[in-house]
Image: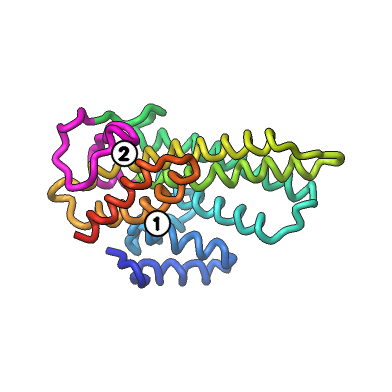
Amino acid sequence: MVSRGSYTDEVVHTAVICHEMQLSEHLLKAMQVFAMFMEMTREEIEFLQEPGKDTPLDGLLRCFTETTRITCVIEEFDQSNREICQSLLDSCIALEKLHEGLYPKIHQGVHADPPTYQAGDLDTEFPATDNIFGPAYRFSSLDDARLHMFFWLSLSFFYPVFYKCQILVMESQPGFVPTVLQGKRWQSDEHRLSELYAYKVARSFPYCGQKGMGTCGLYYGLQCTIQISRTCPHVRNWEGFVWATAFLNTLRN
């Protein structure tokens, strides 16, 4: 189990692998964060580094890594450079397709959402989501829940970056004149998709709070609640924000 203020042996081992591969600092950070989120063993990490692997874990690693890379470039480059802006947008389009191709591998070859529980059918220690985010999802196992949760978490992180790149391309065009209405529309689209996937993550929590799940479910929820508590205020979903606070209080008790 990964503790909150320290790195586990698995994460340290990931850093060693990255150093040996001479990856950039940004990719190293992404792999460390991914390893903490996914609680990967050394064997899993080594497996992901082998060439030709195409597992859901491998796909999630690439998604988190690429989102991190694009975000870091946005923070560092000259945003008036149209070629770089377009290159970043092209990378985002490719990353969206990567996500689209990854989900069927996670969810039994289909694009549909997991089945859900009826209200009151699930005996869980976590706060109910039915009236705030939607009915709780039903998974085949905790590992299945883990893959779904971090896939949706990845998309919740990704879409604000995607829309930022679209705006940069638009603003880098000669003669571009920004308007208040246009800015609001872009921001609305960005928040709408980030919100959608954050809520899917929240609907996964009750499954992880069942008796017998141990502390694994608590840990997954802790990492994801941070993104939910960031997303809800942007869309003025104060009930969702209060729910996230209640969830954190559950972890304290």
To which quarter of the image does residue 55 belong? top left
Report the magenta residues as a range. 117-146
Q: Quadrant of the C terminus?
A: bottom left
Residue 36 point in image, percent of width and height: 38, 61
Q: Residue at x 54, y 61 (%)?
A: 27
Residue 84 point in image, percent of width and height: 75, 50
| Gap between marks 1 and 2 measured at Cα | 30 Å
Which of discs 1 and 2 lies nearer the camera? The answer is 2
Q: Amino acid at mark 1?
A: Phe
Q: In the rendered view, how is the structure colored?
A: rainbow
Residue 96 point in image, percent of width and height: 55, 38
Residue 203 is marked as 2
Q: Amino acid at mark 2?
A: Arg
Secondary structure, mark 1, is: helix
- Residue 148 in view in this figure: no
Asked whether 8 falls inside the magenta stretch, the response is no
In the image, 183 versus 141, the foreground residue is 183
Q: Main secondary structure of the magenta part?
A: loop
Residue 47 is marked as 1
Q: Residue at x 37, y 46 (%)?
A: 241
Q: Residue at x 44, y 64 (%)?
A: 32
In the image, 240 versus 211, the foreground residue is 240
Q: In the displayed structure, does residue 135 sit left or right of residue 171?
A: left
Secondary structure, mark 2, is: loop
Q: Is residue 108 above or below residue 234?
A: above
Q: Earlier in the sequence, mark 1 or mark 2?
A: 1
Q: Are marks 1 and 2 in contact (CB under 8 Å)?
A: no
Bin the neighbour count of mark 1 within 10 Å (Cα to Cα): few under 14, some 14-19, many 20 and up.
some
